[in-house]
């Protein structure tokens, strides 16, 4: 296997930076929602409306990226993506009334969608140049940055400092990287493809892979939003154990993504997806049936080990279905991400109210198993490597 050139190694470092920025800035927003709630005096329903605004505009941003990138390149998409996210963060520093939160979050959400799509496009372009799986590593940077950002917000809270300080920290990090960002990113191979060479998008395959992404984010939304509530209200965990389900989940997601590229090169993508699906489904089932908080935390940890690799490998498989239209495919696949988050976060509460939280956690365990029906789509296809 040929070694990538120095320019591609440099590009890989910059793409790692963009994934880290994306994870860190989003985590700053999400972990600061309690502070925003207290500052404005809004209730949980109002917070949900704000989050939904972010997701709707993120979906719009992803569609715009899918339209712009094939003509201008995903390297052109990412600088405005982070400029918009930084603008949204800085706007939230001010003591805005409730109605004014919506335009601020809409700006942030639009930048988030541009960033999610642009990162996916850049990551797959660099992976194509390397000729081997490296996509999990990019997602690992995103997860690690999210964990660091959450710890930063926690530290600021412990020091009794205004939570908005975290927004300034995130904005400064983004502004430091922004001037050099575009020069460090990759040129999309799609730019060199003439319209006559393009084919119809593989909608059937794209839809099946999109449903797999949605199911993963349903599971992720359940653990991220409801694991602490489940441990506290259903399993009567002590205060110290309540956040440990989410912490264990995030830690194993990071571990899975750090090891994912190494494992996939030895097992193949379809085999790794099969094992990951079984582990994630089993972890959710274990958490659902667990009579003990510690056993449930173990279940959430196993869930992270499984779910952590499925999304990166799904994007990798999707990019290979039509390499000459990779940017458009990534932008559309990205929409299933937001749909899954909405369902996972919102529908779980409805199911729990109608039945129980145990059933609500068991539902995504069954849905994740459905990915086994489409594992053949994950088989590697031969893609031209550029070194």
Image (tube, helix red, strand yellow):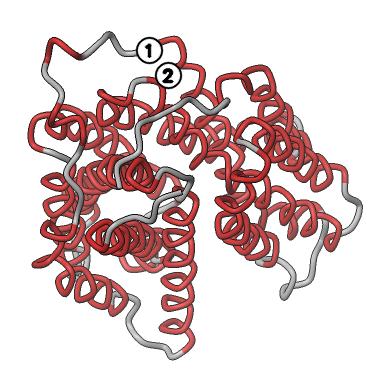
Residue at screen point 42% across, 75% down: 153
Q: Secondary structure at mark 2?
A: helix
Mark 1, secondary structure of its residue: loop
Q: Residue tagged by mark 2?
A: 206
375 or 244, nearer to the observer: 375
Residue furthest toward the front? 2
Is 155 placed left or right of 242 in the picture? left
Task: Answer with left or right where residue 194 lies relative to residue 39.
Answer: left
The answer to whether mark 2 and mark 1 are in CB contact below 8 A is yes
Where residue 301 sits: x, y (%)? Answer: 72, 56
Residue at 42% x, 88% y is 160
Q: Residue at x 35, y 32 (%)?
A: 384
Considering only vertical position in the picture, is 87 above or below 339? Answer: below
What residue occupies the far bottom of the structure in this picture?
159
Give the labeled residue for mark 1: 202
Q: Position of residue 180 (x, y in %)?
A: 11, 66
Which quadrant of the structure image shows residue 122? Answer: top left
In the image, residue 96 sits, relative to residue 126, either above or below, namely: below
> Where residue 127 appears, x then y in whole percent?
38, 45
Other-residue count near label 2 (Cα within 10 Å), few / some / many at <14 / 14–19 / ≥20:
many
| Residue 237, image quadrant | bottom right
User: Residue 366: x, y in percent?
Assistant: 73, 27
Left or right, 374 with reference to 117: right
Q: Nearer the viewer, residue 86 or 311?
A: 311
Residue pictured at 15% horizontal, 62% vertical? 181
How packed is label 1: few (under 14 Cα within 10 Å), some, or many (20 or more)?
Answer: few
CA distance separating discs 2 and 1: 6 Å
The quadrant where residue 40 appears: bottom left
């Amino acid at each position: 296997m040929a070694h990538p050139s120095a320019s591609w190694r440099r590009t890989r470092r910059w793409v790692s930076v963009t994934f880290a920025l994306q994870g860190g800035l989003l985590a700053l927003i999400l972990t600061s929602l309690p502070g925003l709630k207290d500052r404005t005096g809004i209730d949980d329903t109002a917070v949900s409306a704000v989050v939904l605004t972010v997701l709707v505009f993120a979906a719009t941003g992803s569609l715009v990226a899918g339209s712009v990138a094939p003509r201008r390149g995903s390297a052109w998409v990412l600088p405005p993506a982070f400029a918009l996210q930084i603008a949204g963060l800085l706007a939230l520093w001010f003591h805005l009334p409730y109605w004014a939160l919506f335009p601020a979050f809409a700006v942030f959400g639009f930048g988030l969608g541009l960033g999610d799509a642009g990162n996916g496009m850049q990551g797959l372009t660099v992976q194509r140049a390397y000729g081997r799986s490296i996509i999990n590593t990019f997602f690992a940077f995103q997860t690690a940055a999210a964990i660091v950002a959450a710890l930063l917000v926690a530290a600021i809270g412990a020091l009794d400092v205004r939570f908005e300080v975290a927004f300034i920290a995130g904005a400064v990090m983004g502004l430091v990287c922004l001037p050099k960002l575009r020069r460090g990113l990759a040129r999309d191979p799609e730019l060199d493809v003439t319209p006559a060479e393009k084919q119809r998008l593989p909608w059937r395959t794209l839809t099946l892979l999109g449903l797999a992404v949605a199911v993963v984010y349903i599971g992720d939304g359940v653990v991220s939003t409801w694991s602490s509530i489940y441990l506290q209200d259903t399993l009567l965990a002590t205060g110290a154990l309540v956040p440990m389900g989410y912490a264990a989940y995030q830690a194993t997601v990071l571990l899975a993504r750090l090891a994912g590229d190494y494992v996939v090169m030895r097992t193949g993508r379809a085999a790794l997806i099969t094992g990951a699906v079984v582990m994630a489904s089993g972890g959710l089932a274990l958490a659902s049936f667990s009579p003990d908080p510690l056993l449930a935390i173990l279940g959430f940890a196993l869930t992270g080990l499984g779910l952590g690799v499925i999304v990166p490998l799904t994007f990798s498989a999707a990019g290979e279905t039509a390499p000459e239209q990779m940017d458009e495919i990534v932008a559309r696949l990205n929409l299933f991400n937001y749909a899954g988050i909405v369902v996972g976060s919102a529908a779980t509460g409805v199911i729990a109210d109608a039945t129980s939280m145990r059933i609500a956690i068991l539902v995504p365990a069954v849905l994740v198993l459905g990915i086994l029906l489409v594992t053949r789509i994950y088989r590697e296809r031969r893609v031209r490597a550029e070194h």
